[in-house]
Image: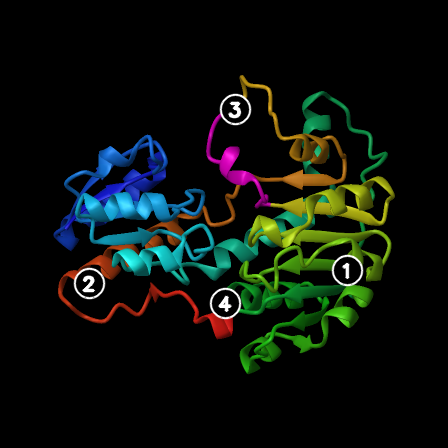
Amino acid sequence: MHISLFSAKGYDREFFDEQIGESGHTITYFEDILSTDTLALAEGSDAVCVFVNNPVDRKLLEGLSKMGVRVLALRSAGFNHVDLEAAEDVGIPVFRVPAYSPEAVSEHTMALILTLNRKTHKAYNRVRENNFSLDGLTGFNLHGKTVGVIGTGAIGTAFCRIAAGFGCRILAFDPKPSDETREAGAHFTNPETLFSESNIISLHCPLIPQTRHIINQKSISMMKEDVMLINTSRGALIDTPAVIRALKKKRVGALGIDVYEQEENLFFRDLSGEVIQDDDITRLMSFPNVLITGHQAFLTREALREITRITLNNLTAYEMDKPVQNEIKPKPASES
């Protein structure tokens, strides 16, 4: 199959070039996202590959179908950016990469926690200016603190193991509690208990209607003052204006995010020479107790290699008329 890969970065090229030969497929890279303006670039392709920052709506899917594109391959676990009903209507199957490296994301989650807590980013900048003062750098011991984990799939469970290694008490919530997560040291409870007892709350659930803005004014009101909130899952799990208000009132003690609700307009691009028009993220960046990274939690060599392998294997299975386990279909209306 010939693949048009959009939003191509240097690391995408490196790992796809490494494996494309063995797969038998061919590939063309485009730095732009797939949009109505760039749709023509996919002409002559059997498959189009996009990343999680690329919305794919009905109009785009209809356009892809008309030009003969047979498959939409996501090189991500998340799929909330794709109109699955439209894809089914036009007969384009959608494949994803459901699990590539849970450790990559969970380790970045702990990096955010440690950096916010011990303020190593501030210490780094101070020392570079010959300022060795320790004022304002006081943190707390993670050992013995309660960490709430919302969503205990592969990433959430991997994070539970890491938190357990620091001696934390772990409270978890998931509609489908697992023995594996319990073995990782977590105790399953309800959201209200998790909110009220946790010193740190980390989000690892998918973005579905039931989890959209799960962190909101009401849930924040249940939390301990000075709670630390961490999100390395999907931006829209957090009601950003509500968190900004809580930060201003010091109801939230620290916020670490690798994802942002409006990130498709910002992330994965160099905007250093531009004025950011998004008032919410500029407000967040003004807080000294907020740490933002640009959706890089997945960015390890191991994860990139696995994302590439699974993406290509999905296409190979489809081409050989074999079942593709990673195909996504829209849920029936009764389940949504």
Name the mark nearer the viewer: 4 or 1: 1
Residue 127 position in % (x across, y down): 71, 27
Identify the residue shown where x is 50% and y is 59%.
103
Q: CA distance from mark 2 to mark 1?
A: 43 Å
Q: Are marks 4 and 3 in contact (CB under 8 Å)?
A: no
Tag on residue 318?
2
Name the mark nearer the viewer: 4 or 2: 2
Q: Residues within 10 Å of mark 2 (few under 14, many from 20)?
A: some
Identify the residue shown where x is 76% and y is 40%.
289
Identify the residue shown where x is 56% and y is 52%.
234
Q: Is residue 301 magenta?
A: no
Q: Are marks 3 and 2 in contact (CB under 8 Å)?
A: no
Mark closest to the chain's N terminus, 3 or 2 = 3
Mark closest to the chain's N terminus, 3 or 1 = 1
Mark closest to the chain's N terminus, 4 or 3 = 4
Q: Are marks 3 and 1 in contact (CB under 8 Å)?
A: no
Q: Which residue carries the number 1 mark? A: 219
Residue 332 position in % (x across, y down): 43, 71
Q: Which residue carries the number 4 mark? A: 154
Which quadrant would residue 222 be assigned to in this image?
A: bottom right
Chosen colour scheme:
rainbow
Q: Which residue carries the number 3 mark? A: 271
Q: Is residue 244 above or below residue 307?
A: above
Secondary structure category for the residue under label 2: helix
Q: CA distance from mark 4 to mark 1?
A: 25 Å
Q: Residues within 10 Å of mark 1 (few under 14, many from 20)?
A: some
